[in-house]
Image: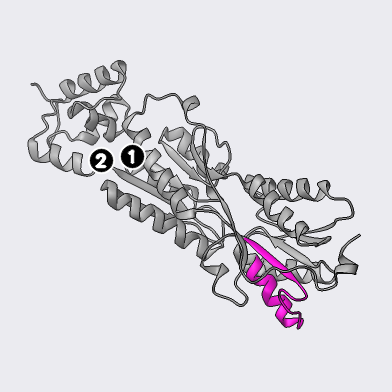
Amino acid sequence: MKKRAGRSRSPTIIDVAAQAGVSPMTVSRVINGRVGVDPQTRASVQEAIQALGYIPNLAARSLVTSAELRIGVIYSNPSAAFMSDFLTGVFEEASIRGARLILLKGENGRPPDQAAIEDLVASGISGLICAPPLCESPAVMDVVRKARVPVAAVGAHGVEDAICVRIDDRLAAYEMTRRLIDLGHRRLGFIVGNPDQVASLKRLDGFYAAVRETEGVKATIAQGDFSFASGLAAGDQLLQASPPPTAIFASNDDMAAAVVSVAHRRQLDVPGELTVVGFDDTTAAVMLWPPLTTVHQPVRRLAAEALGLLVAEIGMPSRSSGDRGDRVLGHDIVTRQSTSAPHDMDAALP
C-alpha cells in the first residue's frame, strides 16, 4: 500500500487513531476483530489504516492486546481507613481480571489538577473508577464525559453516564437511628458528612425519617466532612449543648472515633454516659476503645463490583447508558461496645 508522502517513519496505531478521530483502544479493537465497535467507526478506522499504509505485525498486535485493559483510578478521601478498603477491593479485582491500574490521587478530598486528569484520560485508559467524593465532582466527571471514557463510581447516587455501585444510605441511617431510639435515647446528635456528597444528604434524611416517627425526640445537627478533625470539632459542638445528646451518630467511623476521643477528654464514659455510633465498619471502628457499633458498608465489595461492571462495560461499549442504573448492595448493623441505654432513663425518655 502507498504511504503518506513525506513520512520518515512507519505509521503507528496512534497515527491511525488521530487520522480516524478515535482512541488507540478503538483502533486496537478493529484490528483484533473485537465486537462493540459501530460500523461507521469501524469503516473510519479501516480507511485510516489504508490511507496511512499501516500494517500491524504480530508482535505489535500482541503488545496492544496485552495492554488493552488499563484502568484509571482517581481517589482523594479524608478517611484513610475507607480508602484502604476501597483500594484493596480494586487491586484484588484487577489482579483477577488481569487489568493494569493507573492511580491518580488528589489531596484532602479535592480532585487532582484538571491537567492531570486530562493527561490520565489521554494516556489511553480503557475506563475509569472513582472513589467518593470525586465520583460526584464536576471537575472530574466533565473531563471524563468529554473523552467518552467508561466510568464507574463507588458510593455515588445517580451520576450521569456512570456505573454507580452503592448501598442504600438512607435506609442504613434510618435503621441505625431506630436502634438508638429503641435503646431509649431521646436526645440525639448527628454529624453530617461532606455536603458535596449525595450519600451525606441521604444519611441525614434517613436520620430525620426515624426521628420524626417518635414523639419527644430532640435532634441536634453538626456539620463534618468525613475527616477525623471535623469529627473533633463537631463532637465538641454537640457536647456543649445544654442538655447534651445521650447518643451521637456520626456519618462515618473516622468522625465517630473522633467523638469518642472528645468524650474521653471530657471524662465521659462511653457508652455509660454517651453512646456513639458510626458508619462504614472500617478498621477505624475497631482500633479504639470501646469498639464502635456501626453500619457495615461493604467497601471492598463495592469497589470490586464496580470494577467488574466497568470491565463488562468496556467489553460492550455500545450498551445504552440508560441500562446501567445504580447497583445497590446490602448493608448490616454491627453491634459492639459503644452503645447502651441512656444512663439516666428518666431524663432521656419523654
Instruction: Please tell me which of labels 1 and 2 falls first in the chain.
Output: 2
Q: Residue 225 location, x and y as percent? A: 65, 59
The stretch drawn in magenta includes residue 8: no
Look at the numbered discs 1 and 2 and tell me whether their residues touch, using CB distance below 8 Å.
yes
**Does residue 324 sit above or below 281 in this rendering?**
above
Task: Identify the residue position indicated by label 1 in the image.
Answer: 126
Q: Quadrant of the N terminus?
A: top left
Q: For residue 260: magenta?
A: yes
Above or below 288: residue 133: above
215 to 126, vertically: above or below: below
Whole-angstrom CA distance, mark 1 to mark 2, is: 7 Å
Q: What residue sits right under mark 2 in the picture?
A: 68
| Local secondary structure at mark 2 | loop
Q: In percent of the image, x 74 and y 51: which residue is there?
A: 207
Type of amino acid under label 1: Ser
Classify residue 263 as left or right of residue 33. Answer: right
Q: Position of residue 133 (x, y in %)?
A: 56, 51
